[in-house]
Amino acid sequence: MFESCADPSSLEGLSWFACYLTTGKHMAFYASFGTVLLLLAIILPAALLFGFAGATAARSRFLPLSILGKTYSAIVRGVPDIAFFLFFVIALDQAFEYIRHKIKCPDWSEPIRQGNDFVVCTAAKMPLSNSPAWVHDTYAFLVAVLTFAIVYGAFAAQVLYGAMQAVPRAQIETAEAYGMSHAQAFRRILVPQMWIYALPGLGNLWMIMVKATPLLFLLGIQDVVYWARDLGGTKQARFTDYPHGDWRMFYFGALLVFYLLLTWVSEKVLDRLTRRFSLGQATAAGEAMRKAGA
Amino acid sequence: MNKLILSAAALALASSAAMAQDVVRMGTEGAYPPWNYLDDSGEVAGFERELGDELCARAELNCEWVVNDWDSIIPNLVSGNYDTIIAGMSITPERAEVIAFTQEYTPPDPSAYLALSADADLEGGVVAAQTGTIQAAFVAQQGWSLVEFATPEETVAAVRNGEADAVLADKSYLAAIVAEDDSVVLLEREEQIGGGVGMGLRQSDTELKDKFDAVIGEMKCDGSLNELIEKWEVASTFDDC
């Protein structure tokens, strides 16, 4: 990056570190923090969406839909995360390719399963094998997002289901007395009021989700843990311009600080949200706020 | 200046011609110097990078490098996420049941032990090896206490911090570490396990396997493979072809 970095063996002290910390590999390490934050920013709404759909389905009066909603959250919550992440992603990818294969290559005669191999026609590859590396990376990232959303959506479904049940029955009754339909009461009364009941559970879930982001590494994405492990490992002078000993402690220390900061900021935001949602609610916190205001 | 524009145009033409072909995605681990590792700029480098690029050039294939964890390197190959494994993988009958191998590009070499001192106790101590390697299988077979790690780097770190008494791994990998670190030594004892190292491919991908087989054979005969092996000090050389 700097011109003085052309000959690293002549460098010492601070200038050595300045060059060392700006190698291409380190840039990839810094960028991977962005990947983690981006992942969190996308899976939060995605998981909430899955959770909301799951909870609404589970409450449905239409039996098959209710069974579907309950099965989703029961099965996904029951399977260990790590099994889910290792197995499900490959299965999901194969499912996409299978569907594309059926559409794009209808007159393909060879079997898709050949012994151990999963072979689809070239046009059905996801992404196409001649697409540039960033397309492959983005695809891997999106599959990861989907997997995270499905897994954490199942937990969110359970939390939201509980929250919907917790809204006092009298509120719905009053809504019905005003002549609101079932859907109107759901939209106008139930949903706005349920968040305060859901927030502690969702907050917990968010914290777990933040801590689960290193699982990205299992999905073949070069995330913070991957780079920390690679960069921190002992480096011999034969293979790098910047040889050093076992520095994993420092790199993982940096990760520790990053994750602590992230959870600390989350706590602050959750506190504010709790206060915001308590306003005017028929809960102890809402009542206390009303009294303080009056 | 004109020359520059011309050569740039020629380059663009050449690369667009290459784009027209199918891309062969080469899967490697990127954590096993001198075989394969990531250099300072984050690119795949090492013996297998040079070998792979040369093989692709000779077979007129357009190759791209993919880094994948060792643990899931075979499942991702058979499910089609890349087309070859070129990651210092020894040819064994167990692996050959799942994937196909090209002919070997390094001869069968003994594995070595790295320890803090030359009198490390293997039978009574703890031996570290990378998960899913022939070395891990060997240690387990001997009935010794085995600790497995996901990356080769962690196996060596385990010896340095006393968690394990020795590491069993390919000699070339350990030799590169011993060469620059006085606190560890190679034991005299070596183990002859596994076959040579070959490229892994899907069993259904016979056409690609034939192509690589042909160019590996070609490189064996004209001596360029031996030259690469000596340059990177990864293994012994081939006597004939």
Image (cartoon, coloured by chain):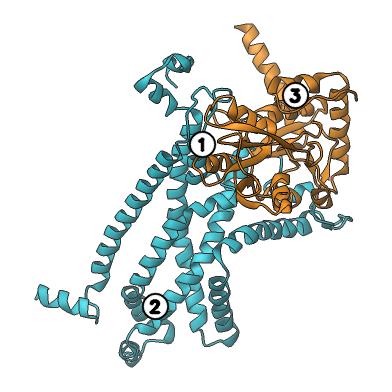
Q: Which residue is mark 2?
A: A187
Label 2 resides on the chain identified as A
- Say which element carries label 2: helix
Q: Nearer the viewer, mark 2 or mark 3?
A: 3
Q: Position of residue A183 (x, y in %)?
A: 43, 82
Q: Which residue is mark 3?
A: B229
Q: Colour of chain A?
A: cyan
> Where does the N terminus of chain A fall, quadrant-wise?
top left
Q: Is label 2 in contact with label 3 (beta carbons under 8 Å)?
A: no
Of residue B172 and residue A160, the one placed in the foreground of this image is B172
Label 1 resides on the chain identified as A
- Say which element carries label 3: helix
Q: Which residue is mark 1?
A: A233
In the image, residue A51 above or below residue A63: above
Q: Nearer the viewer, mark 2 or mark 1?
A: 1
The Cα–Cα distance between marks 3 and 1, rounded to whole angstroms, is 25 Å
Label disc, if present, on residue A294 of the rendered structure = none
The Cα–Cα distance between marks 2 and 1, rounded to whole angstroms, is 54 Å
The Cα–Cα distance between marks 2 and 3, rounded to whole angstroms, is 70 Å
Q: Could you say which chain is coloured orange in the image?
A: B
Amino acid residing under circle 3: Ile
Q: Is label 2 in contact with label 1 (beta carbons under 8 Å)?
A: no
Question: Which residue is drawn at the image coordinates 43% and 86% (left, top)?
Answer: A182
Amino acid residing under circle 1: Gly
Of residue A50 and residue B109, the one placed in the foreground of this image is B109
Asked if residue B173 lies left or right of residue A112, the reply is left
Of residue A165 and residue A9, the one placed in the foreground of this image is A9
Asked if residue A37 lies left or right of residue B102, the reply is left
